[in-house]
Amino acid sequence: MSAPMNLTVKPAAVFEQPALAMLLQLYLREFAAFTKIDTDAEGHYRYPYLAHYWRDPARFPFLLRHRDTIAGFALVRRETDPADGSQQMDMAEFFILPEQRRQRLGERAAQSIFALFPGPWQVRVLLANKPAEPFWRHCIAATTEGQFEEHIDASSRIFRFQFLSER
């Protein structure tokens, strides 16, 4: 998958955690329109898992840059099914800054991340997050040539697909 000119998708280093935490606050502020998110005493949105992305070998933090400026982030994790031990990748969180949207950066960044982890994937979209649904459906359909499954549970639309490295 080729990325737009000047788009880089790189693992976030430990020293970049504060930058990712700042972006995460912007993301959670938007996300709070769709679901209740707790805040701490200072009014910051809580996301208790961020530090785990640098400690847990099954979690992968990424910073997305466009023209050497941070454009967003992605938090990816490998999940293991307790029933059969099978593994799949999960796009836990994904965010493009509003001023960077509508340039196909999100689609290209997601495709670049999928390519880093060939095999089974899942992307969950909160049902209340109506703007995200068409983005992910288009992105995944373009990535998989339409070969994906879509399910709905109590709160989310779940896209499942295989990313094949030869695409």
Image (cartoon, grey):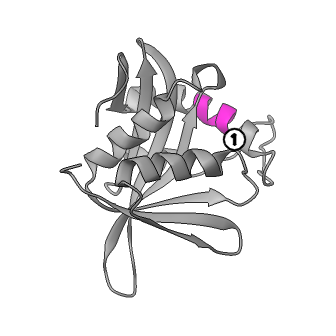
Q: Is residue 30 left or right of residue 68?
A: right
From this view, report whether residue 80 is shown above or below residue 47.
below
Between residues 43 and 82, which one lies in front from this camera angle?
82
**Callout 1 crowding tier (Cα within 10 Å): few <14, some 14–19, many ≥20:** many
Q: Is residue 152 left or right of residue 41?
A: left
Q: Quadrant of residue 30?
A: top right
Residue at (33, 31) in percent of width and height: 10
In the picture, residue 120 is in which quadrant? bottom left
State the residue lying farthest toward the left: 166
Residue located at (58% from left, 44% from top): 135
Give, as a three-letter code, the residue at label 1.
Leu
Task: Say which of 150 and 114 sits in front.
Answer: 150
Q: Which residue is mark 1?
A: 28
The magenta stretch is 23-27
Q: What element does badge 1 sit on?
A: helix
Q: Residue at x 38, y 63 (%)?
A: 147
- Residue at the spot 52% in from the left edge and 29% down from the top edge: 72
Residue 18 image offset from top left, x and y in percent: 53, 28
Residue reaching furthest to the bottom: 83
Asked whether residue 16 appears in the rendered view, the answer is yes
Q: Quadrant of residue 64?
A: top left
**Would you say residue 166 sits in the magenta stretch?**
no
Question: Where is 78 relative to 60, above or below?
Answer: below
In x, y percent, where is residue 166? 18, 50
For the residue pair 79 and 121, the one nearer the viewer reads as 121
Q: Is residue 47 visible?
A: no
